[in-house]
Every structure is written in C-alpha cells, then in structure tokens.
C-alpha cells in the first residue's frame, strides 16, 4: 500500500511500527488529543468514565492513567483525578459537590486561594461559605447546618501551621452526612493517612513534593468511594481539566524518590527549626513537630512524619522593615512562592490581614527547607539575622 501513497500522505500515515517488547523503567509519554478507535462500533460504545479504555486526550492516556493509579496507591485510595494545578483540584471538588443553596465550611488557615474561591462561590454562585477556627475540633458539630454539604480541612494549615483534630472533624461531619475534603499537600500523602483518619476526599498539590523540581503545576483528587469519584469525574470532564503528558511524566519520574526526599526535607527542617528556636530573635517556631505549634498534640497522634515547610515568628521588637531586610540578606534561601523543590525559600506574610484574631504581634516568615546541607542553611540564616 505504501507504494500507492504520495509522500505527503506517508508523512501523515507511516507504515513503520516499532517492534514490541520494549522494556524500561520510565513510563512512556503518550501524547494525544485525538484517540483513535478501531471502528465506528467502538466509537459509538465509548465510555469516557470507564478506565479500561481510551476516548479522548482530555480523559487521559496511559501516561496519566499510570500517574493517577500510582497517586491513589500512595494515598491508599482507589480513584484519582488529575487537574492542571492544585487550585484546579480544589475547584473540581467545589464544583462537583456544591450547588446554589448549599453551605461549605472552610478552615480560617486554609491555603489562601481556596478561601478566595470560597468567597467567589458565596458572591456569585448562591453558596454560603463560612470560615471556622481550625482548632475547633468536635465543636464543628455546632456549625453544621442542614444545607452544609462539604467541610474543607487542611493539616497543617497554610502559613500559620495549626494541626486540626481531623478525626474529630470527620466524626462530627459524618454524623450529619457531610463530606470532608482534606488538603493533604504538606507531606504529599506520606506522613498522614488521610482516609484512615476519616477524610472522604483527599486533594494534593502535586506542584510541591510530587513534582519536586519546582517546574510543574498539577493537582490531584483522590477518593475511595466509587460514587463520589463518579461525581468528581463528571465535574472534571465538564470543566475540561486535562493535564499535559510531559508534565505527568515529570511527576512520574519524581515519584520513586518521593519518600526519600521527604525524609531529607523533614530532617533538614527539624534541624533548622531547632536552631531557630534557640535564637533570641525568634519567639515561636510554628513547626507541627514542635510544641510551639498549635495542634502539636494532634500532629503527634496523627502523623508519622513531617515536611520541610514551617514558619517562624520574630520577636515583636523587630519591624517588618527589619525582617524584610533579613529575608533580603539571605543567600541560599531564595524569595518566592510555592515549595517542595530542592531549593530553600523564605516568604513574609502579613498575618493580621490573613487571619481572624491572629494572636501574635511579631513578623511571620515562612521557610521552605530544601535539600541543601542544613548546616549551610543555618549559617545563611545566622548571617542574615545580623542584618536585623
Ligand atoms: C500550593 C498549594 C496548593 C495549590 O497548588 P497549585 O498547584 O499552586 O495551584 C493548594 N494547597 C496547598 C496547601 C498548597 O500549598
């Protein structure tokens, strides 16, 4: 047949197929928008929700199916959906489960764009959004209304790092038939067994440790319950949340080292945190594994490890101008958002504007401890503290 094809047509339809039986560690990168069906009957009987086959690039290729399966395995869940960012994964959960007239509860220390999304749902979508004290524990029961559909939790919360009593929140929610979605980004699903503690939905920003390279934006939503998965999958399809297969590959490439990297981040962070705790410039080290951190008892009960992200509160005698100078004086620590990569980062936050009833007067700086030698990081912090 190839002899009858013009060169132009051969450029599109080559006769070559690579031999079968190739084996290697990496997952192949399957790019596709169009997925080919062998015949019309196969096209007509397609089912995009059935993961035994392929229908359209948006619903996945072997590369994204593999990543989904492996992430579900890490979380000890059954189903996983990928989204183009962690925030898109949060939006998928909200749009799958909330409609006009519903109520959602969000912790006051939630990842800030989750709060912004909640406020938008309240302003333009007829949903009531209420923010709760993350340390509320069993008290959450009194906030649950007949129209409450979803409770978000985050452990620890972003920036201020409080560790909630997740099992208590889940018990109270389930008694009233409300679902709990946990943002489990902090240890990438390694240090907190979210489903065992009662979460119904686990969301992760793969952008952080699963990528590990500070080069990919992606999110995941993991579940155990098939009907819940189906709801989320429908929202995923309606919202058109596809991911790029090169990016999916990059995350797959990082997964074998995930646990080792997390342990290294954890060790480095604990060493740096202990050193900071000994400094007179620092009033509090908000690291869940240290007693300064609200919810430390919950951390000890619920977690098997920590990550590399924590915050410190300077003594109130230091102004914002001084702590900004401290950050600007750091050499190994860079300034920038996101975290989970190999490089250490420092970011200041204005907590008075971010939290209700924020109790501390000193400046807060969040540190992401990367994979550098912790002694070098400590030396860097020490020289920058001189600049105060
Ligand atoms: C970064 C982050 C997200 C969002 O991830 P993106 O991929 O940046 O959208 C969500 N939750 C937490 C806790 C995060 O740290």
Image (cartoon, grey):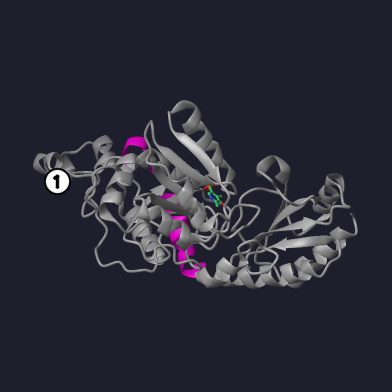
Magenta stretch: dominant SS?
helix
- For residue 8, what is the image quadrant? top left
138 and 56: which one is in front? 138
The residue under the point 78% across, 66% down is: 276
> As drawn, which residue projects farthest toward the top?
124
Relative to residue 357, is residue 379 depicted above or below?
below
Residue bearing the label numbered 1: 38
Query: Is residue 242 magenta-colored?
Result: yes
Relative to residue 186, is residue 57 depicted above or below?
above
The residue under the point 38% across, 58% down is: 67
Chain part drawn in magenta: 237-258
For mark 1, give the secondary structure: loop
Total tally of numbered discs in the picture: 1
Relative to residue 165, is residue 356 depicted above or below?
above
310 and 369: which one is in front? 310
Q: Residues within 10 Å of mark 1 (few under 14, many from 20)?
A: few
243 and 276: which one is in front? 276
Question: Looking at the image, can residue 84 be seen?
Answer: no
Task: Where is residue 138? Give x, y as percent.
Answer: 49, 57
The residue under the point 27% across, 42% down is: 56
- For residue 373, what is the image quadrant? bottom right
Question: Looking at the image, can residue 272 be seen?
Answer: yes
């Amino acid at each position: 047949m190839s002899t009858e094809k013009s060169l132009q047509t051969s450029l599109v339809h080559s006769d070559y197929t690579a031999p079968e039986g190739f084996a290697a560690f990496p997952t192949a990168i399957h790019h596709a928008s169009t997925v080919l069906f062998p015949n019309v009957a196969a096209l007509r009987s397609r089912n995009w929700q059935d993961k035994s086959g392929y229908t359209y690039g948006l619903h996945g290729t072997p590369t994204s199916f593999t990543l989904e399966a492996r992430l579900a395995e890490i979380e000890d869940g059954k189903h996983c959906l990928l989204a183009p960012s962690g925030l898109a994964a949060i939006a998928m959960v909200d749009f799958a489960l909330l409609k006009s007239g519903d109520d959602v509860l969000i912790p006051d220390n939630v990842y800030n764009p989750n709060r912004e999304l909640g406020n938008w749902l309240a302003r333009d979508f007829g949903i009531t959004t209420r923010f709760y004290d993350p340390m509320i524990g069993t008290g959450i029961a009194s906030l649950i209304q007949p129209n409450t559909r979803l409770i978000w939790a985050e452990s620890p919360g972003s920036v201020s790092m409080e560790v909630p009593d997740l099992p208590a929140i889940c018990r109270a929610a389930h008694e009233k038939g409300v679902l709990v979605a946990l943002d489990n980004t902090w240890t990438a699903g390694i240090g907190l067994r979210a489903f065992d503690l009662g979460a119904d939905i686990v969301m992760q920003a793969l952008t952080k440790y699963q990528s590990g390279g500070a080069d990919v934006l992606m999110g995941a939503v993991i579940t155990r319950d098939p009907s819940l998965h189906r709801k989320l999958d429908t929202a995923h399809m309606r919202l058109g949340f596809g991911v790029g297969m090169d990016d999916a590959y990059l995350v797959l490439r990082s997964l074998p080292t995930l646990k080792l990297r997390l342990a290294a981040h954890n060790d480095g962070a604990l060493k740096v945190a202990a050193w900071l705790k000994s400094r007179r410039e620092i009033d509090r080290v908000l690291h869940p594994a240290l007693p300064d951190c609200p919810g430390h008892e919950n951390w000890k009960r619920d977690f098997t490890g920590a990550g590399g992200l924590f915050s410190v509160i300077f003594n109130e005698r230091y102004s914002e101008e001084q702590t900004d100078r401290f950050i600007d004086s750091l050499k190994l620590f860079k300034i920038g958002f996101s975290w989970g990569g190999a490089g250490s980062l420092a970011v200041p936050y204005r907590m008075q504007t971010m939290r209700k009833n924020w109790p501390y007067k000193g400046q807060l700086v969040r540190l992401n401890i990367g994979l550098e030698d912790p002694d070098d990081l400590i030396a860097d912090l020490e020289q920058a503290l001189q600049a105060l």
